[in-house]
Amino acid sequence: MSVFKIEHVYYSYDSGKTPVLKDINYEFEKGKTYSIVGKSGSGKTTLLSLMSGLDKPKDGKILYNSTDISKIDEDVYRSRHVGVVFQSFNLLPHMTALENVILSIDVSGIKVKNKKEHALDMLNKVGLDEEKANRRVLMLSGGEQQRVAIARALSYNPDVVLADEPTGNLDSTTEKQIMDIFKDLAKQDNKCVIIVTHSPNVSNNVDNVYNLENN
Ligand SMILES: Nc1ncnc2c1ncn2[C@@H]1O[C@H](COP(=O)(O)OP(=O)(O)O)[C@@H](O)[C@H]1O
Ligand SMILES: [Mg+2]
């Protein structure tokens, strides 16, 4: 069964103008990696923001485990079911990596025995040791910051990870390391990983590619 189903989705920023997204239909499954590609301005970020519940389609619907996401409480949806990763990481730079992840656990309201231990586990999972976990984000490299952002997205164990150009600010070696993390999340943890990208290194490395321009 698909974890996400996009059905006849339309979106426009100004009513009356040509829609940015027009009759989008696609399904996403757990345990697989996807990339959404298309030229700049084709609506990739817009589609991701609809899937992450930031905005609503003008027509059509997005089903998460068969439920229309517009019928799920927005805060619960965004802080439990989908984890989002951005090109520019969007971390709190003056806080440590660990504090960033703990904050996300707090916001989601999930129950964990030991928050610090859980946050450290997540950071270890993406290849950051205790020393790096306790560093301020400012003092980490771009690749390390993106690892923190992934750990943060995983902190409440969402089914789906949505990433918008997550390797856009990284060199190709670091990009490959981040892709390995995303692939492991799908293959080992059965998550659905959806990556918006320009990079052929990413789109050549996923199970399925959805090209918005072919729509
Ligand atoms: N907040 C906004 N208000 C009006 N138009 C927007 C807004 N955000 C994006 N757009 C327009 O919507 C189209 C798709 O944008 P976007 O989804 O960001 O594309 P992509 O991520 O594929 O580059 C573009 O033409 C863009 O100019
Ligand atoms: Mg974009």
Image (cartoon, rainbow, N blue to C red):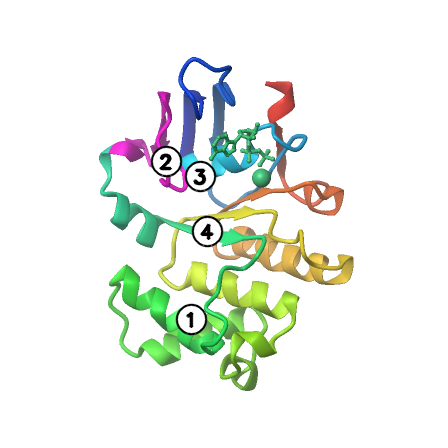
Find disc 1 in the rendering and name its residue.
100
Whole-number angstrom distance, CA of label 3 to CA of label 1: 22 Å
Region rendered in magenta: 51-70
Residue 55, which numbered label? Answer: 2
Percent coordinates x, y for residue 61 in the rendering: 35, 24
Which corner quadrant of the image does residue 88 belong to? bottom right
Find disc 3 in the rendering and name its residue.
49
Work out whether mark 3 precedes mark 4 in sequence or the reverse, and give the earlier one. 3
Percent coordinates x, y for residue 32 in the rendering: 54, 43
Disc 3 marks a residue whose amino acid type is: Ser
Could you say which is closer to the camera, residue 143 or residue 202?
A: 143
Work out whether mark 2 precedes mark 3 in sequence or the reverse, and give the earlier one. 3
Find disc 4 in the rendering and name its residue.
84
Residue at disc 4, secondary structure: strand
Could you say which is closer to the camera, residue 129 or residue 84?
A: 84
Residue at horizontal 35%, vertical 31%?
A: 56
Could you say which is closer to the camera, residue 137 or residue 25?
A: 137
Work out whether mark 3 precedes mark 1 in sequence or the reverse, and give the earlier one. 3
Percent coordinates x, y for residue 170 in the rendering: 70, 59
Residue at disc 2, secondary structure: loop
Whole-number angstrom distance, CA of label 2 to CA of label 4: 14 Å
Asked if one can make out residue 147 in the rendered structure from this viewpoint, the answer is yes
Q: Magenta segment: does it hold 52?
A: yes
Residue at horizontal 41%, vertical 35%?
A: 50
Label 2–label 3 contact, CB within 8 A: yes
- For ligand 1, tell me if the residue under mark 3 lies within 8 Å: yes
Which corner quadrant of the image does residue 144 belong to? bottom right
Q: Quadrant of the C terminus?
A: top right
